[in-house]
Image (cartoon, coloured by chain):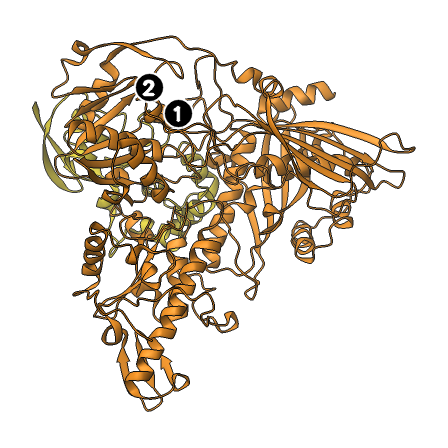
Chain colours: A orange, B yellow
Amino acid sequence: MSFSRRNLLQGVAGLVVAFALHEQAQGSPARLAADSVDGYLAIAPDGSVTVYAGKVDLGTGARAALRQIVAEELDIAPDAIGLVEGDTGLTPDQGSTGGSTGITVGAAQIRLAAATARAALLDLAAQRFGVPVPQLSISGPAIRTQGNRSIGFGELIGGQTFGLPVDKSAPVKNPANYAIVGKSLPRPDLPAKLTGRHIYVQDHRVAGMVHARVIRPPSIGARLLDVDAASIAAVPNARIVRLKDFIAVVAPREWDAVRAMRALNVHWSDTATLDGSGALYDTIRHTPVLREEVLRVTQDPAPLASDGLRLLQAAYHWPIQSHASMGPSCAVADIRDDGGTVWTASQNTHRSRQTFARLLGLDPARLRLVYMDGSGSYGSNGNDDAAFEAALLSREIGAPVRVQWMRADEHGWDPKGPPQLLDMRGAIDANGDIAMWETTAMLPANTSRTGPPLLGAIAAGLDTGEGMSSGLTSLNADPPYDLPHMRATISWLKATPLRTSNLRAPGKVGNVFAVESFFDELAAAAAADPLEYRLRRLSDPRGREVLNRTAERMSWVPHTKSPDHSAAMLRGRGIAYAHYKQSETYVGMGMEVEIERASGKIRVTRVVCAHDCGMMINPDAVRAQVEGSILQTISRTLFEEVTFDHAGVTSTDWGTYPILTFPDVPRLDIVLIDRRLERPWGVGEAATAPVAAALGNAVFDATGVRLRQAPFTSARVKAALVTAS
Amino acid sequence: MSRLTLRVNGEDRVIDLGDPDTPLLYVLRDDLQLHGPKFGCGLGQCGACMVIVNGAAVRSCVVPAAAMAGKEITTLEGLGSPERPHPVQAAFIAEAAAQCGYCTNGMIMASTALLQRNPHPQEQEVRDELAANLCRCGSHVRVLAAVMRAAREG
């Protein structure tokens, strides 16, 4: 085995970073290569290990989990591992942090890099001591012989690169012997976050920086006709930066930038062309279809004319929703001459580096995007937009610029989770079995490969590319059951009213709402127990187990008589199931609800969830993600709907776009199924998928009324109850 | 430009105030480099910017800094440090009661103020107290557990 000795590093871990930067500046890709050990790991002369991850921790606990995985393979202490995330100058491109791929893809690559490094370190030590590898062991950052001679990682290779490709067949530790993976180690970032010491991107400041606020038009796509510069004359040192229809104010003091934004008098053209959110589902039905895709088909649905078949059909509606991050998007950029740095909470720093460089006419090698923690994002919120706006402004004025979106920017202009409309058809035979199932899902087409077009680039007249982006929205539009006559079709729509992006579990939340609610409709039509009806058609043992464990924890028993739907306070329970992407995490979800008949107000009193993601790297981090998935999706199901008029979004603050609050938070009863010998699947999205259906099924159980349109607002529920009675 | 003296985390701090209407949040974050309080909405709706003023939790994005002269202002940094966290901070750390952590400043400040005047609240009282503190990641059950733990272990 030969090691590259030319890349001599110096000193401690901090200097490793400096060296890597130097390499990057010289265009050497060695340290950034996604297929080389050196891309992911560096060992300093003092033996300390630094991990370079392209995927980032968004408050998910990945920062703890990744260290555990590396520590396990290298037999070192997890808290001694340095970690650099999402820095295009230092970390390999592992793709966007999204789609529940942080652990399944990102950490899996790093685990192999660590295993390759381990084998290389053992080989080096074997040569050094003249003993065979099996007689060596690792303890701490050192390798020992049976005779108790020992040599540290630092002495073996510290300061040098491995010069090795990641070996896909590197010997990895047997999960049965894990000592670190599988433990709920604390998240390393929390003490600083909870005492005000953690530096979020919103807190980042660089010397000579000015503060910017971007002025949004009163209607989407409006042209900037005229700007009255004198209108901000009273604000000290404020100035206007304009590129075509992109206009911003900058000032040395942040509050002055806010004042200038408010004072600036801009005249815009009127481009109010939208149909408004009140007509959303009509708009969808009248939108041309780009193409039809058969997602999955078993046998073509049986002819419906057959004797004894009862046909059911229903349409399910999922509204446009906002990421609604607590902190509006923010970024700092320092672009000089032909390159520079952007500090951003983007989930896609590598992708955005390419896009930004193209739009700004820069060499990507001279542009660096550095990930910093921001307010939680659940897909592409406004972070990439704010980052590009900061870069554009910095290039224009030749100084570092901080762009901070205001609340109305975030709610009004973040790329939205797309609307979904699903037509469901099913038939029950004389035995009460499902004879036929058809899903037709109408979804905005994913026609962009580079994410949502950037707001600032559109306004500045730059070629930001065509197309829409919203993630893998078609998955789970087919039922997760063994149905002989089943077809799920996607009608990919050519257009959608607002700019879209991937919002947590893209498409799956609305699809499973439709599929698992409609399955309940068929169960009710067959006068079957919803749990038994599911199990009848579910053969996957892991799927059966999450459903059974959920039911068990709920003390589920079939109704022996019809529930009373006449009380002033109605109570019920519902169940739903999802196998995320039909291939990943299994989730059973049970809900207990109360509905106040007079007001239509729904209160979820208890949630039971059985969750099987295979191996859990850090069970408490898994639990936190499941909790968050459930609560955020209850919020989306009960309260959240982006409203818009002919000009643009009208739900631009927390009053017009309410979310779940503490008084409405239910008790959570979560069962994490531990399968440490199975491969780990993602946990940030799966538990969102069955929430809306379980909730709607519980409301049906309580009231006899089927809710087919989210959100289940009090007004909507009250109206449905009145209609039903 | 006018001089303003604020008492923040037990120290007198002198600020050159630009606009007399500058909200306290901007002074804390930009002039005093205190990053505990966060900008969330600027509308007093979400609570991310909360600080404690004379014992009460206040939304610093909607109070003018100039009106805070002579009052005791405490920020998240002033409660405790990673090495010596305040009991409420310690309880939040023990319960891992944050995901992104952006809203958590407000959760800690509001519940600290609550526990000062009501050291042993019922969980429902905590829920009511935090009704206008928004969290998007869904850390609510852990926040409730943390406040109840702080009340127990105070």
Location of the N terminus of chain A by quadrant is bottom left
Quadrant of the rendered structure where residue A144 is?
bottom left
**Left or right for A291, reference A522:** left
Where in the figure is residue B85, as x and y percent of width and height?
A: 27, 53
At label 1, the amino acid type is Trp
Quadrant of the rendered structure where residue B45 is?
top left
Residues at discs 1 and 2 in contact (Cβ within 8 Å): yes
Where in the figure is residue A671, as x and y percent of width and height?
A: 58, 55
Q: Assign a secondary structure to mark 2.
A: loop
- Tag 2 or tag 1, which sits nearer the N-term? 2
Q: Residue at x 28, y 23 (%)?
A: A214
Q: Specify whether residue A664 is in view.
A: yes
Where in the figure is residue A319, as x and y percent of width and height?
A: 55, 26
At label 2, the amino acid type is Arg
Looking at the rendered structure, the number of numbered marks drawn on it comes to 2
Q: Residues within 10 Å of mark 2 (few under 14, many from 20)?
A: many
Q: Residue at x 48, y 58 (%)?
A: A619
- Give the label on residue A63, or none: none
Q: Chain of mark 2?
A: A
Where in the figure is residue A629, as x and y percent of width and height?
A: 51, 43
Residue identified by numbered label 2: A216
Location of the C terminus of chain A by quadrant is top right
Q: Chain of mark 1?
A: A
**Left or right for A542, reference A662:** right
Q: CA distance from mark 1 to mark 2?
A: 9 Å
Residue farthest along the right direction in this orientation: A307
Residue identified by numbered label 1: A413
Q: Residue at x 47, y 45 (%)?
A: B141
Residue situated in front as seen by the camera: A64 or A401: A401
Q: Residue at x 25, y 40 (%)?
A: A363
